Amino acid sequence: MTPADCFAVLWRETQRELARASGRPENVGRTVAYEAVCSVGVEAGIYIWRSGRFPTIRIYRSSDMPDDVELPDLKIRPVEDACTLAHERGHFISDPDGKRSQAAYTSLRNRDALTIRAKTTIIDEERRAWANGRDVLKALGCDDWSAFNAIEAECLRGYEEGLAGRPTGPA
Ligand SMILES: [Zn+2]
């Protein structure tokens, strides 16, 4: 099974997990959805905790937005989307409320100088999120890792190069 074969189940399961974390398990709507963006960055999605009231995952698209953004798009790029969703779910598992890494990611987004510790925090968190995402897909029966491995490597390289090019600030 490829990640694409697990995509629909992964989507539903992730909706339920995020809704449960919000304390409103019945409220699965909009927990996982596509979002239109001008350009997709290193990571083709995002996980946002929002103080737990409404944790969400967004899968970015710069074109080909699906008609219903709250359903998995099984036609256009299901392998990539499934890998991205598994990775964002991995962030939810690794650092559910952002306590460990939020400050570092905020500095990254604001284009501030980053301390060595912040850079390490980000890379470690990215690696953990991919490892967790792999476990999630494995539990759903995925056993074809070629696309997942390629996307993981490309994404981690993007972070490493991006962080290497960023000035290192005082600790
Ligand atoms: Zn990530």
Image (tube, rainbow, N blue to C red):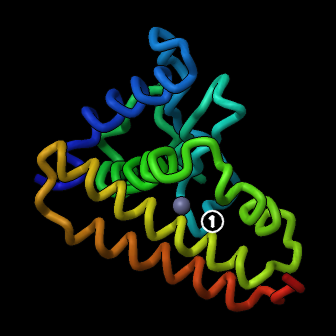
Q: Quadrant of the C terminus?
A: bottom right
Location of residue 148 by image quarter = bottom left
Q: How many marks?
A: 1
Judge whether 80 appears above or below 73 on screen.
below
Q: Residue 89 appears at what percent x and percent y? A: 44, 46
Identity, as a three-letter code, of the amino acid under mark 1: Gly
Of residues 49 and 170, which is closer to you in this image?
170
Residue at the extreme top: 26
Tag 1 residue? 41
Name which residue lies at 25% across and 33% down: 9
The correct choice, above or below, for 154 with respect to 79 in the image is below
Q: Relative to residue 152, is residue 85 depicted above or below?
A: above
State yes or no: Cβ of the residue under disc 1 lies below 8 Å from any atom of ligand 1.
Answer: no
Spot occupied by residue 20 in the image (x, y as percentages of width and height):
46, 21
Residue for point 61% across, 60% down = 40
The residue shown at (87%, 85%) is 169
Tell whether 84 sits left or right of 45: left
Residue 168: image quadrant is bottom right
Residue under the point 20% across and 67% down: 145
Please state if 44 lies on the left or on the right of 154 as rendered.
Answer: right
Image quadrant, ligand 1: bottom right
Rendering coords of residue 92 (x, y %): 50, 45
Rendered view: 104 above or below 11? below
Q: Nearer the viewer, residue 12 or 53?
A: 53
Where residue 34 appears, as percent x and y from the top left, is 53, 38
Judge the density around disc 1: few (<14), some (14-19), many (≥20) Cα neighbours within 10 Å. few
Q: Secondary structure at mark 1?
A: loop
